[in-house]
Image: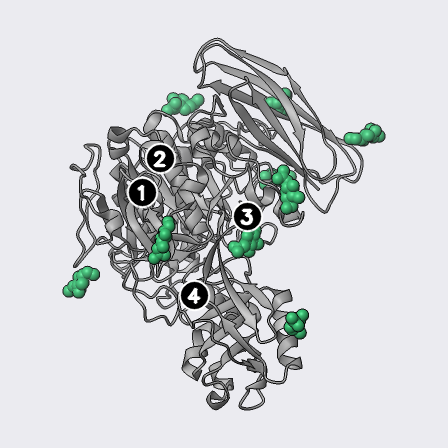
Amino acid sequence: MAKLAASFFLLSCLLVVFLSSISAVAYEDKKEYIVYMGSLTSRADYTPMSHHMSILQEVTGESSIEDRLVRSYTRSFNGFVARLTKSEGDKVAKMEGVVSVFTNKKLQLHTTMSWDFMGLKEGHKTKRNPSIESDTIIGVIDGGITPESQSFSDKGFGPPPKKWKGVCSGGKNFTCNNKLIGARYYTSEGMRDSDGHGTQTASIAAGNAVPDVSFFGLGNGTVRGGVPAARIAAYNVCTDIKCPSDAILSAFDDAIADGVDLITISLGGARRPLERDPIAIGAFHAMAKGILTVNSAGNSGPYEYSVTGLVPWILCVAASTTNRGFVTNVVLGNGTTLAGKSLNSFDLKGNKYPLVYGKSAASSNCDAGFCDPSCLEKSRIEGKILVCDVADGVKTAKSVGAIAVIFKSPIPDVAFVVPLPASGLGKKDFESLVSYIESADSPQAAVLKTETVFNRTAPVVASFSSRGPNAFAENILKPDITAPGVEILAAYSPDGGPSDNDPRRVKYSVNSGTSMACPHIAGVAAYIKTFYPKWSPSMIQSAIMTTAWPVNATANSLSKTSTEFGYGAGHVNPIAALNPGLVYELEKADHITFLCGMNFTSDVLKVISGENVTCSPKNETLQRNINYPSMSYRYCGSDSNFTVTFDRTLTNVGTPSSTYKSTVVAGYGSKLSVSVTPSVLSFKTVNQKQSFRVTVIGGDLDSYVPSSANLIWSDGTHNVRSPIVVYA
Ligand SMILES: *[C@@H]1O[C@H](CO)[C@@H](O)[C@H](O)[C@H]1NC(C)=O
Ligand SMILES: *[C@@H]1O[C@H](CO)[C@@H](O)[C@H](O)[C@H]1NC(C)=O
Ligand SMILES: *[C@@H]1O[C@H](CO)[C@@H](O)[C@H](O)[C@H]1NC(C)=O
Ligand SMILES: *[C@@H]1O[C@H](CO)[C@@H](O)[C@H](O)[C@H]1NC(C)=O
Ligand SMILES: *[C@@H]1O[C@H](CO)[C@@H](O)[C@H](O)[C@H]1NC(C)=O
Ligand SMILES: *[C@@H]1O[C@H](CO)[C@@H](O)[C@H](O)[C@H]1NC(C)=O
Ligand SMILES: *[C@@H]1O[C@H](CO)[C@@H](O)[C@H](O)[C@H]1NC(C)=O
Ligand SMILES: *[C@@H]1O[C@H](CO)[C@@H](O)[C@H](O)[C@H]1NC(C)=O
Ligand SMILES: *[C@@H]1O[C@H](CO)[C@@H](O)[C@H](O)[C@H]1NC(C)=O
């Protein structure tokens, strides 16, 4: 109950995975099924649409299948959506050329200070490549977008890059420009943004620099995206916060063919095997065309195995704090100050008001600790500060006449916008508040206006950010990286309030979530691509991961989820990522080998990849040897010692003639004995490759935290760092 109540408060801000998804629309006994058919064949006599229709005719025995075929994917990969009965779906699944058949599950949607915090300074302080940046197109798969936002103004922009093949098809009252060059939507919602999410993510990745922006004076400064000169193509796949799989696949099908350079997608929650996960499928075909997909890790933390975006061809992003924090102090009648969190722009001038605990203001027998308005007696609350056991009270307090609210926050490390004076307290502070109310004769308090503070303990991964280990591929450490995703000021939609039940309308607002972290990494990836337009997705991913700042796992308190399972390789460092020295490269064929290890058969992989594929006999080391920039091993023996190897290959992208020496730095948990052969790598030319083997020996593993170490290759200038994580 408490969890559910909290979720409503977070709807506008965070991906809420604990709300169950709505099942697909039923047409009698038929459902919408997605039929995924892998790569498009280049055979001249093949037309995907007629193939789809003939499959449907064969399975249904009907000659007219118009009301069966919902949509076809024909531009970047092969497949379709159809209304089928379960037995028809089963029949289709067995047909030649069909990889998977799955129901149309709905996924969910999961500023600007943050760029300074990452070291990407404003204006001339940052090296840029303006002409190439202006030819870079970021595909944003999200909710709608607000084309009128100053963040997307095309002042100073020339016509779209020549490679652009997309359209502006945003429906009524929606116009693109030379900044926002494309728009397509796949739900009944149209293209306009009603909840701010899509506008925020697009502006974080590639919004213009807009000076003097704040949320009612809070966090003021210049907001900007990572690549302010880049173009944006927006693809709306959601209605409200629900984003159907078939729409997500359509957006990938179009974005890849439209000519985007990079895809950012701040939604998820499929938790399905990858052949039924629309983001994994779409991103695979993007990767095959040289397009990197950046995806949010999810907001279901801090629980283990909650992370999504698990395949090696997706760059999966966790959310962490910056050194700017917001505090909303509560001053009790006895003089004690409690530091709460919220974005409270309302000024009650430090006046104290009587406190009333929801639990003691119940009109009948119901438990009003949750501040359910049907339980509360207005006459006992009017003009007072309402105290609630859950964050939900913030939405309802005004309707019962409260002046302000103090609530127990389920996420006390994050400030959310509130529609009236309110502050969220952590468990301990809330308990002292309640004990004060119970002991004082006439308890009262003041809820102060929010202040901006410098937070020394940053970056720390936010409690809500989803954590590893990886539920589907134990040898792939996820998330990959962390980036700012807490209290980010970014462009917003004036069509919706900045919080629930909030009548205010704003053009910029503050929000938190891995949704906000993901476009930061997309911006960094695009920034790298403007210097190295020919770099493959894996080279960009490697550059971002191996140059990351190490995160302090003990900054809060050491636990399983405060480690690499929270932040992966560490915190993004955009400037260092421009000059990684060496990169771990992965090609499409390497991903296919990885899929062989995931037990896909050669036949299925042939359809997915559109190429001849032969999986060699099952080899347990196959997956561990994927040339990934991090190393992960799940040890499932007893407490006897283990020895495990990882084979890797580095490509020189730095100085032609260079010598790198390896060092291993211990991390957390049990001591691992790590050796590297050879321990020195010499390169003579750029693009030269050198291979090495890492051998890890350990035993009697700590089961409380993973056991980790860091492998660092250094030539004295570049430090190429990879985390090694072993867990029991
Ligand atoms: C079109 O959008 C603008 C900007 O949001 C709005 O002011 C106007 O009312 C809209 N017009 C219609 C017909 O919806
Ligand atoms: C905006 O920030 C500057 C400092 O950067 C400060 O002097 C000014 O008072 C702030 N304005 C508002 C409205 O908070
Ligand atoms: C400072 O950062 C820590 C670690 O993320 C967090 O727990 C705390 O709430 C932050 N404080 C403020 C005022 O933002
Ligand atoms: C105020 O009351 C709280 C709760 O009883 C208590 O923890 C705190 O010490 C008190 N402060 C002062 C200054 O007495
Ligand atoms: C990590 O954080 C802890 C707790 O705040 C602090 O004591 C320690 O010095 C930090 N370590 C580093 C390397 O910053
Ligand atoms: C592949 O199949 C084998 C045998 O059924 C099984 O032991 C192994 O765990 C499977 N691997 C994966 C990654 O599913
Ligand atoms: C695929 O492999 C078969 C058998 O080895 C061969 O006959 C065929 O030419 C190959 N096709 C392609 C496209 O390489
Ligand atoms: C498994 O892979 C390793 C490393 O690639 C190789 O040395 C070994 O021979 C392989 N074993 C089998 C049974 O294929
Ligand atoms: C197991 O490994 C630990 C350290 O990794 C080592 O100290 C110990 O001697 C090893 N035990 C055996 C039986 O090899």
Give the Cα separation between the discs numbered 1 and 4.
28 Å
Q: Quadrant of residue 284?
A: top left
**Secondary structure beneath disc 2?**
helix
Q: Give the number of the disc on residue 344.
A: 4
Query: Which numbered disc flags the more N-terminal residue, 1 or 2?
Result: 1
Residue type of the residue flagged with mark 4: Asn
Which label number is shown at residue 206? 1
Tell me, yes or no, whether the two marked residues, 2 and 4, touch with CB atoms within 8 Å: no
Task: Name the quarter showing ligand 8.
Answer: top right
* Camera sees residue 634: yes
Circle 1/circle 2 CB separation < 8 Å: yes
Which corner quadrant holds the N terminus? bottom right
Q: Is mark 1 within 8 Å of ligand 1?
A: no
- Describe the colour scheme in one phrase: one colour
Residue 461's disc number: 3
Amino acid of disc 2: Ala
C-alpha gap between disc 2 and disc 4: 34 Å
Would you name the residue on which mark 2 appears? 526
What amino acid is at disc 1? Ala
Of pointers 1 and 3, the one earlier in the residue sequence? 1
Q: Is residue 586 left or right of residue 178?
A: right
Q: Is mark 3 within 8 Å of ligand 3?
A: no
Q: Nearer the viewer, mark 3 or mark 4?
A: 4
